[in-house]
Amino acid sequence: LAAVAAVAAAAAGSAAATFAGWPVLPASLLKSSSLVGGLCLALCPDSLGGLSSAVHPLVVAGYVGVTVNALNLLPIGRLDGGRMSQAFFGPTGGSRLLSAGCLLGLGLASLFADSDLYFFFGLFAALVQGRPEVACQDELTPLQGARTTAAYAAGFFVLAALLPLPAVLDPFPSPFAAALG
């Protein structure tokens, strides 16, 4: 529910007219999320044209909300995503393997992304949240129907929120990326 509210805030903020005094953010920050960058481009195509953009405060709130919810839904240890993966795969090694893969992905993303957020969140998740969840009362009943759909929808949300906006969809490529190649 909070993720839907964050996406709605980002959409409402990017559709509003520009006023002086709004926060100025680097366009690359908004493009670091496919979901938020895509909404900004769809609702206000000129908003990400320069190196920085004056955006409505709801866009900032929406970006922060989308990012926090997506990080919480990563399938690591005792995070909400870890609980979902344990319910999805059961107490076997599938959820632990997925958790290790996500931690490795966060480590690699911290090396290649232009944000330190992935490094610090991965460190926090590994040190504090990395242990498996306490056993549930009913771990034998597999997920069915709407819960499986919700798990897939949450996975799609995480990918859309944490993967950067593809260069193919970006009408305003970064001048730095153009200089590199």
Image (tube, rainbow, N blue to C red):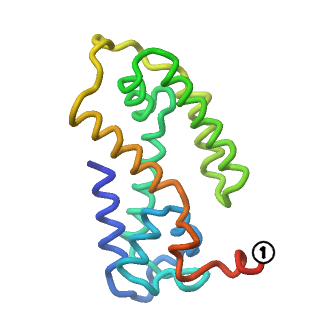
Q: Is residue 147 left or right of residue 55?
A: left
- Rendering coords of residue 15 (x, y %): 32, 79
Residue located farthest toward the right when viewing the structure as drawn: 180
Name the residue carrying label 1: 180
**In the image shown, does 79 or 152 lie closer to the viewer?**
152
**Above or below — where is 9 with respect to 79?**
below
Residue 10 sits above or below residue 142 on the image: below
Q: Judge from the rendering whether residue 4 lies leftward or rightward of residue 110; answer left or right.
A: left
Q: Please report the residue visible at 66 percent of the width from the left and 53 percent of the height from the top.
A: 116
In screen coordinates, is 25 left or right of 40?
A: right
- Which residue lies at the image location 67% right of the left edge and 57% below the top edge? 113
| Residue 35, horizontal then vertical, whole percent | 43, 62
Viewer-side residue, 24 vs 142: 142
Q: Position of residue 34 (x, y in %)?
A: 48, 63
| Residue 25 percent across, percent down from the top left | 54, 74
Q: Please report the residue visible at 39 percent of the width from the left and 82 percent of the height from the top.
A: 44
> Does residue 138 lie above or below 104 as drawn?
above
The picture quadrant where one finds residue 100 is top right
Mark 1 neighbour density, 10 Å: few (under 14) some (14–19) many (20 or more):
few
State the image quarter where residue 81 is shown: top left
| SS at badge 1 | helix
What amino acid type should be assigned to the residue bearing mark 1? Leu
Q: Residue at x 65, y 49 (%)?
A: 109
